[in-house]
Image (tube, rainbow, N blue to C red):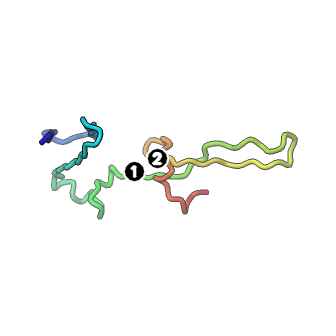
Amino acid sequence: NGKESLKTSGPLHEAISVLVIPQEEDARSSLMYRYIIHEDLLPMIGNNNVLLEEMDSYEWALKSWSQCSKACGGGIQYTKYGCRRKSDNRMVHRNFCDNGKKP
């Protein structure tokens, strides 16, 4: 039936990524997972069942300025903003940021 499994023992201290590569072009894939959270960590879990320390936050950040529309003054220049993950200051896809808060 083509099932594969991956098991670990002990706590995972880093995030893991699972890449599913279909063997046939029209193959369907599904991924099921289970995990256990130690009871000592329960107060650190938010109402969406995600560890609070693992929740990333994002902000709009100035990326660049457009070129000025006129060379000698009186022109218009635009700012370009991108979405930045606060934990490591890396630029990410704009869907992570709240459009309502975009400058």
Q: Which residue is mark 2?
A: 85
- In the figure, residue 26 lies in which quadrant? top left
Q: Earlier in the sequence, mark 2 or mark 1?
A: 1
Rendering quarter of residue 16? top left
Kindly identify the residue that appears in the image at 60 percent across and 49 percent down.
81
Quadrant assignment for the N terminus? top left
Q: Amino acid at mark 2?
A: Arg
Residue type, mark 1 in image: Asp
Answer with left or right where residue 34 lies relative to residue 65: left
Residue located 29% across and 56% down the image: 50
Q: Name the image quarter holding the C terminus.
A: bottom right
Residue, disc 1: 56
Q: Residue at x 64, y 47 (%)?
A: 80
**Seen in the image, is 52 located left or right of residue 67?**
left
Question: Would you call the spot at circle 1 few (<14 residues within 10 Å), some (14-19), or many (20 or more)?
Answer: few
Relative horizontal placement of residue 25, taking residue 99 as reference (left or right): left
Asked whether the beta carbons under mark 2 and mark 1 sit within 8 Å of each other, the answer is yes
Mark drawn on residue 75: none
- Asked whether 1 or 18 is in front, the reply is 1
Q: Secondary structure at mark 2?
A: strand
Is label 1 in a helix, a strand or a loop? loop
User: Residue 98 in the image: x percent, y percent?
Assistant: 50, 59
Residue drawn at 51 percent across, 52 percent down? 59
> How many numbered marks, from 0 up?
2
Left or right, residue 92 beside residue 46: right
Q: Residues within 10 Å of mark 2 (few under 14, many from 20)?
A: some
Residue 35 at what x, y percent from top left?
17, 50
The x, y position of residue 25, in whole percent, is 29, 38
Above or below, comparing residue 103 to residue 80 in the picture: below
How far, Cα to Cα, is label 2 from label 1?
A: 7 Å
Residue 14 in percent (x, y) is at 28, 39
Q: Nearer the viewer, residue 13 or 60?
A: 60
